[in-house]
Amino acid sequence: MEKGLITFFDVPFAGFYQIKKNSDPLHVNGNLSEILDRVIEWAKKRDLVDTLPWDPAAHKYRQQYFLKSAMKHSVTGDYLLVFLKKTSDDSGNFKGFKAQSKFGDAKGDTVKVGKKVGGAPAIFGEPMYYWYSPECNKLASINFPHSVSDTKNMCEYLKKCIELRVNLPNKVIHERSQYNAKAGRDVLIKNIYFKTPDGKKSLKLYLDFVELRVDIKKVNYKELAARITHIITRDVIKSKDIGSEKHPLLSMFDKFLNEKSKGMNNKHVQVETEVSLTPSELKKLIEIHEAEYDPVHGWVNIGFKVEGSDSAKFFNSYMQRESIYIDPQKKIDDHYFEPQTVLEVINENRSDLLSSFLNNDDSVMSGTGTHE
């Protein structure tokens, strides 16, 4: 089975906003579902190469993205979009090196796939999968071993489609020709803005995705405790005698498990302990962390490992990540999954995947927004 790692994003801005001085943008109309509907409807009428919303000749150094396919679930209203991130150069050639080429060889060790496959033009790239749930207003990237994610530029792609390609009744376009010295010719300049329904005020399109982290104090203690296999404590010491110089965080954890860590001479100490926690014990441990954690001591922390994973997660930055698994045989030409295939698996596990958002409105947002 092929594992798809899910990263969730909140959608704080999506639609058309009135800009007010010294205050936050005021939402007037529109949402992400409407934006996706418009973009999908626009892309349906085009070949893949024509789903690039900007002119590649005018933006030679801009990364190119295409919308390969999309699906909207008839019951949940969820969306699954498959994008293509181009990896070939501007000539359409995909270049690489022979696997058995020798170090330092300069000739005869490169390979190139032309811009035509079987006589037909081709675009070489990697798929990107995005899932949007209108019910809880959460976007998610799904990263398989064969795919990539680029949420910032996916957001920009959607904006450019709305601004440059999709016809909207409230869109106003002013065009003028201006000579460009670098291009050596006149270029067309478009000024695009949007109007309120009454046509009296200008609006700006905002679209923003913010990566989500879950407040560790508000997790489902029962569910998380059942998954934790190891507790990890990090401390900084000043003496070879760890027992007498421990930071209170590590000392309190020793009291919690009734264990001692001895004989280590490191100044930065990490202790990993196999555990079987009850929900109440996990809650107590989180309370200890909350009382003792000091961001100034960046190393000093408490973390954990869950069953089936060797990576450590720490309470101060617990990231909500879920996974789905799909049979790789379901890939089209061993390259990508169709939206229906991914959405069917998501729907089978939807309640669990969205449990933190459907049952808890207090998830903490963290990260950098992407709206302009």
Image (tube, helix red, strand yellow):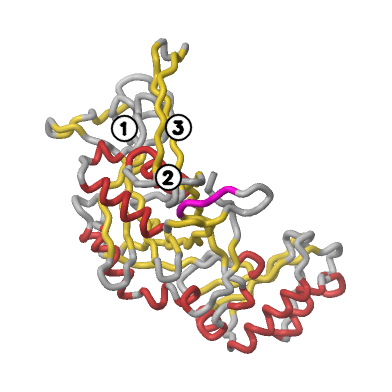
Amino acid beneath label 2: Lys
Which residue lies at the image location 45% right of the left edge and 64% below the top edge?
A: 138
Provide the secondary structure element on which disc 2 rests.
helix
Element under label 3? Answer: strand
Circle on res. 159: 2
Instruction: Please give the name of the residue rendered at 48% of the width and 68% of the height, measured from the top-left corner.
Output: 309
Magenta stretch containing residue 100, yes or no? no
The vertical placement of 298 against 358, above or below, is: above
The numbered dot on residue 191 is: 3
Disc 1 crowd rating (10 Å Cα; few below 14, some 14-19, many 20+) is few
Q: In this view, does 192 lie to the left or right of 78?
A: right
**Rendered image: mark on residue 98:** 1
Q: Give the range drawn in magenta.
A: 15-19
| Up-down relation of residue 294 to residue 276 (above or below) | above
Residue 40 in the image: x percent, y percent? 28, 51
What is the chief secondary structure element of the magenta stretch? strand
Which one is nearer the viewer's eye here, 183 or 247? 183
The quarter of the picture where residue 51 lies is top left
